[in-house]
Image: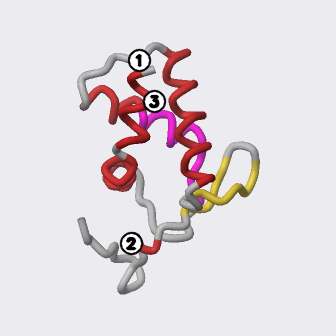
Amino acid sequence: MKEIDFITNHKIQFLNFFRSKFPTFHNSVVFYRDIRYAADSFLISGGFRPSDAELEAVANALIKVMVSDGVFKAVTDESWTLNYPEFHTTKPGKPSLNF
């Protein structure tokens, strides 16, 4: 599926996009619904119009890739801890904007 390839080939851009939509920092907890909504918006910005079924498949594939890469660590079936030191804050409450 082209949507899965697109989003998994642009993981860093997706993470930055995700962060722009949802306040996210290193060690933040991220939720399935947020990943799904961000994936939908990211794909639309890339020229795709995924159906709900396609979007579900993309979100699940993306989560599997992020877990295998060590970017997500499972907390529950629908939440993960973001293990992405590039999003570490330099001061409490202020994100480190290193794009």
Q: State which tag comes first along the sequence, 1 or 2.
A: 1
Residue 4's disc is 3
- Please give the name of the residue rendered at 46% of the width and 13% of the height, measured from the top-left corner: 51
Tell me the amino acid under the disc marked 2.
Glu
Q: Quadrant of residue 81?
A: bottom right
| Viewer-closest of 59 and 90 | 59
Q: Residue lying farthest bottom?
A: 91
**Residue depicted at 35% across the width and 54% down the height:** 12
**Residue at figure coordinates x 39%, y 72% from the top left:** 86
- Which comes before the other along the chain, label 3 or label 1? 3
Amino acid identity at mark 3: Ile
How far apart, in angstroms, are the residues tagged by discs 2 and 3? 24 Å
Q: Which residue is mark 1?
A: 50
The segment highlighted magenta reads 29-39
SS label for mark 3: helix
Please state the horizontal and vertical placement of residue 20, each as a whole percent of the image: 31, 53
Residue at horizontal 55 percent and vertical 67 percent from the top = 83
Please give the label number shown on residue 86: 2
Amino acid carrying mark 1 in the image: Pro
Split into 4 quadrants, where in the image is the C terminus? bottom left
